[in-house]
Amino acid sequence: MKIKILTYLSSLICFLNACNQPGGQLQVPNLQAGKDAPVFATYAAAKERSSFLLDQGYEYHYYQNEEPVGFYSAQGGDLLLGFQYGDRWITNLQDLAKPPVINYTYPDMVKTTFHPVDQLKAEVVFLVESSNAAIIELTLHNEGDQAEKIKFVPYLHNQYRTFNQLRTTSNGAFFHHQKYPDAWTKSHDLPHIDSLKNLMLLNPSSDVHFFNSNGQESPRLPFSLAPDQESFFQVTGRAYTPEGERYLEDPPRVRIQVQSPTQPERIITETSPIWGRYQQSVNDGYFRIELGNLDLIKPDLEYTFKYYYEPENLSAQYDTTLNLPPEQTSLRRNLVPEENQLPVPPSNVRIKLHADGNRLSWDRSTKSDRYHVYRRQEEKSYFTRIATAVSGTSYLDNSASQDSLYRYVITSIDQSDREGIHSREVVNLPQANMNFFLNGATQPSIMDYASYIAFTNELEIEPGQSEKIRLVRVFDKQETSDQSLNKAANSLMQVDLRPYLQANLELFAPANKMVQFNDPEKDLLFQSANNLMRQVFYPPEAKSSYNYYVFSREPVWGWGHGGQVFHESITMLAYAYLDPESAMNSQRVYAERQYENGYINYRTGSYLDEIIEHDNQLTSSAPWYSWLNWEIYQITQDREFLQEMYTSSKRFYNFYISSRDSDQDGLCEWGGHAVLESVRDALVAVWDQVGWPSNFEGVDLNSMLVMEAKALENMALELGLNAEAEQWRQDHQQRTKLINQYCWDPENGFYYNVDKEDNDFTFKEANDLKRDEIIGFLPLWAGIANQAQAQRLVDHLTDTAKFWRKYGIPSLAADDPYYNDKGYWNGPVWIQWNYLIERGLIDYGYHKEANELVEKVAANMIGQLKENHNLWEFYSPDTEWGGYHKTYIWAGIINRMLLDVQNNEKTN
């Protein structure tokens, strides 16, 4: 293993330290990075070829032994690579003769090399050419001494919903797929396109086949939808592991079952529709189930709720009576499944279609020898029990209509007559099995519910020769003509891929030349973070005259896809080294939409101005706008930008302090929807267990306002506005004095929020505001603490029982009872806040501690890149773990931390 790691590390050093060849030709890297290399492997279209409404990204999966190698997406289908060599079917990583390595990787493209069999070397270039087009170019080299025959079988698999409206062409296939918006997207009236028309072509031409199953799986039907039906009553929540981590699997690995004791022969499951929404019942650790699907009359019904996590055989059950106020239409209930709490469902449920009915069979489950059989007609939203306490492992449903489509599930009954959760669904569709077809079975005609679309192309390659094949996928709105898609796809069949690579080499070479870490894994982290930050940018469109970012491109989730927020814009302090003009334009997005009174809305996107009114106040974002503008200017040295943003920053600052100091005492409190405005928007110890943020003079908020005024002072001085600079200086000096007077606790040597009524640390109970949260260190970043106070803060910081954890500084002290290292703002490492503390440590001369902090944070990020090749919203301070949202923009701030340490080491 060490030899392999040294190989890719040495290749990386050669590229990063000498990326220019004589004559100005940029060198193409050859990283030779295997699955254990810390490489970000998500791809989306380059900024200039991206659009918000039609946009598909992919993750390259090349690191799970039992998983097909290919390019995965959350809702758009997975582009997978398969080969048939004699009677061998080769698609999973463990099937390959030599595993994949990544040769080069950029935000929109990757080159990877592997051997499907010993003598055949496959080179694959994958390019997300635009938001609605992708290209796979495969070159197969025969390295042996005799001719080789192999069949290339690229295939598209959709685990979100089935493909429909399937048609073949001479060398490809037309089909439709759906990408439904989540509730956040719908509630914010963001435009979206639900149904998409696709064309996939393979050159040279090939056969095309549609399948609804693979291996032993049954055909699947998509989860049901009822977006126009008004909700009756919904149960929502999150499911956690016993260790406090959210389950992130999707159905059918996660399953839900609800039934009423008054009518136990009915159940609803995770495939039943969510009334008024386009979403499935379980997604990204959340669940939602619509009780109206049970079609029961009484609103105060009793029900039994069951949850099952298949990979670890964990289950949960609770019983509830809905004797709630009539106006209440939902109930929140989080779950922590436990091992073997319920009878284990039967596995390997199968269905065979006979003239006399549908024959179901299954494998016996542990500790169960009786089973209930349920059937759901597709027009219904609930399952009905059709057989009770079946003692064997098969059942013939001879009451089924041959003209109807049915779903079936089986539940286990234990010796105590407890009923478990249902099995995976089977449906009475004729099976078109891809695996059987590849082994020579006859292919039935299936044209309605396809989960797989496969292309087959047989190649014969002479010794020392190569064959090249290109697969193109394009899609557009469902009303797009065949001719339009054909034209787009055929043009991409001819396009030269080298200019795309050259554009990436030119963009990233200057930033990569800054890397001098003498640690190849940090070099790869740096490159990965650059790829991430660049990837989440869109060009000017709709309301935005300037480029803008979203939090994440793949997967798409509403909250992370609406547009920019000041909170995430801290990432521009790293991104500006990659593309200074783009970073400045991202800030100009805010100035362009700014109100006359200086207000800037909470979130700003191409199609969104998110204005959240709460308690007669408009919600903005945490005020580090002026500071960001000043920091970006120091990188770009663009005086036109400085002048523009000084004007905008003044207006925003004056709006903010005039509307966030309700008692006029010189210290501000969070306003509007204060939890959202405060950055720390969920699971905050003080917010959850003491009081709403607007009740307190915030040490975090006022530290930010000190930095805002300092930035305005520096901007004014740079522009020669000395009188204005003096006003800003007086402002931040007075605020600093008040923070030290009221928020500093000499007993604990820490900064806390204070009750705005009397500026003490008690709100409801004595000293209940004295919770050691990460905000207590912000006075280091803002330069508020004196040297003695700084030393006491550093003593707290470096206490391993509290904050100096293995992988960084948690958002809440580890000895607090509310602490959860995999929670949200009650424990995990938020990299951007660790960056603020690092800056404070450097400013106060704690260089060793600053360097060590960056080492801690980088170590977990590198570990997660090695494991799952992604960059996450936050990380555990205690274990190698990242969650909960992938490809999250502010992970990119690690690059600024790395650069600060590098510069710190040079100057000290």
Image (spheres, helix red, strand yellow):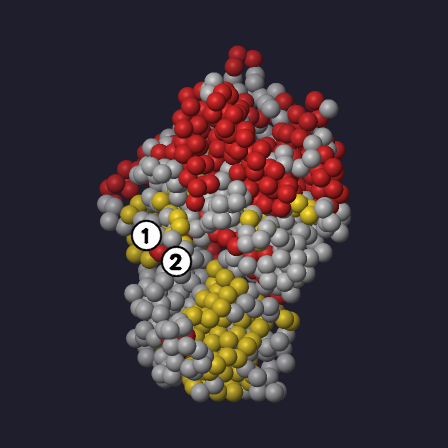
The correct choice, above or below, for 240 with respect to 470 in the image is below
Residue 183 - label: 2
Circle 2 sits in a helix, a strand or a loop, which is it? helix
Q: What is the x, y in percent for residue 84?
A: 51, 49
Q: What is the x, y in percent for residue 372?
A: 49, 83
Type of amino acid under label 2: Ala
Q: What is the x, y in percent for residue 504?
A: 48, 28
Residue 850 appears in the rendering? no
Quadrant for residue 245, please give it: bottom right
Q: Nearer the viewer, residue 161 or 80?
A: 161
Quadrant, the C terminus: top right
Residue 189 - label: 1
Q: Nearer the viewer, residue 791 or 532?
A: 791
Q: Nearer the viewer, residue 826 or 215?
A: 826
Which residue is painted at 58% across and 73% down in the image? Answer: 316
Q: Residues within 10 Å of mark 2 (few under 14, many from 20)?
A: some
Which residue is painted at 57% across and 87% down in the image? Answer: 417
Residue 882 - label: none
Q: What is the x, y in percent for residue 449?
A: 36, 61
Which residue is painted at 46% across and 41% down in the image? Answer: 657
Quadrant, the N terminus: top right
